Image: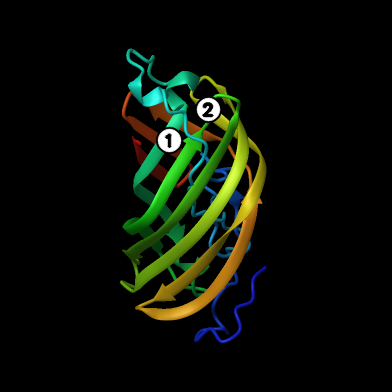
Amino acid sequence: MSDTRGAPHERGWRRPEVIVGIIGAAIGAISIAITVLQLQEGKSAAALPITTPAGIDGTHSAKKNILPDTRECLIGTWNLSRWRVIVNASQFILDTPGTVDLITTDISTGILQFNDDGSGSQTEKMTLSGYGNADRNFYSITTNEQFTFRFTVSGTTISYGSPVGSAVVDSSINHEFLGRQTVHGRLDPDSFTCSDDRLTLSSSGYSAEYERG
């Protein structure tokens, strides 16, 4: 649990419980899923994910005729092009109705690496923003994360293990700073689709799109 002292809405701001799932439990694909704030009892927590760079297979981008949606297709370096996650507005301020559809509005760094030896890494610094569907407030989250992990593939599911790293998450509403949390990793599986030049990772409430580096 990170320190939120000094946050403008400290009385209402829910300190986040972050699911750093190299895309784990609620999110997959090494996207260190960040579940911003714990939801009230009886509601399921939404998670925000995060991504990074890993070892690079210098020959992979030159390979042709790779079978889609296979482990071989995953191997290499991927650049984040879009991230989307839907969270409950009450994860930001208690008792706020509705949901927030957060989409990447700025990607400073977004590198995801899968290596042939089963290791991987993810390095991402990005901002996700969106309006509440009920209160129309403007919500924003900036994440700065760096992780390494192990992975296995079964069909079109990626499972992660041994995460090492952390993510720093800043949250705001209507451009007013709410607080900062540092979160550590937790692993949950991702579903994926993969082709020569594109990768999509998804899990409950979230999806991330990448282009081959």
**Element at badge 1?**
strand
Q: Is residue 147 above or below residue 157?
A: below
Q: Is residue 117 above or below residue 133?
A: above
Does the image show residue 16? no
Which residue does the image show at 33% across and 12% down from the upper left? Answer: 65
Is 82 on the left-hand or right-hand side of 188? Answer: left
Which residue is label 1 attached to?
Answer: 77
Q: Look at the image and tell me in which quarter the C terminus lies.
A: top left
Which residue does the image show at 52% across and 19% down from the upper left? Answer: 155
User: Label 2 sits on what residue type?
Assistant: Thr
Which residue does the image show at 51% across and 73% down from the upper left? Answer: 95
x, y percent for residue 204: 48, 43
Q: Is residue 76 above or below residue 106?
A: above
Using the numbered discs, state the Cα–Cα distance from disc 2 to disc 1 in whole angstroms.
18 Å
- The reply to whether discs 2 and 1 touch (Cβ–Cβ < 8 Å) is no
x, y percent for residue 113: 49, 37
Q: Residue furthest front?
A: 58
Mark earlier in primary sequence (2, 1): 1
Residue 195 or residue 176, whichever sits in front: 195
Which residue does the image show at 52% across and 27% down from the upper left? Answer: 157
Which residue is label 2 attached to?
Answer: 157
Q: Quadrant of residue 108?
A: bottom left
Q: Look at the image and tell me in which quarter the N terminus lies.
A: bottom right
Mark 2 or 1: in front is: 1
Residue 5 or residue 126, whichever sits in front: 126
Is 169 on the left-hand or right-hand side of 108? Answer: right
**Element at badge 2?**
strand
* Residue 21 disc label: none
Q: Label 2 crowding class (10 Å Cα cut-off): few <14, some 14-19, many 20+?
A: many
x, y percent for residue 150: 63, 34
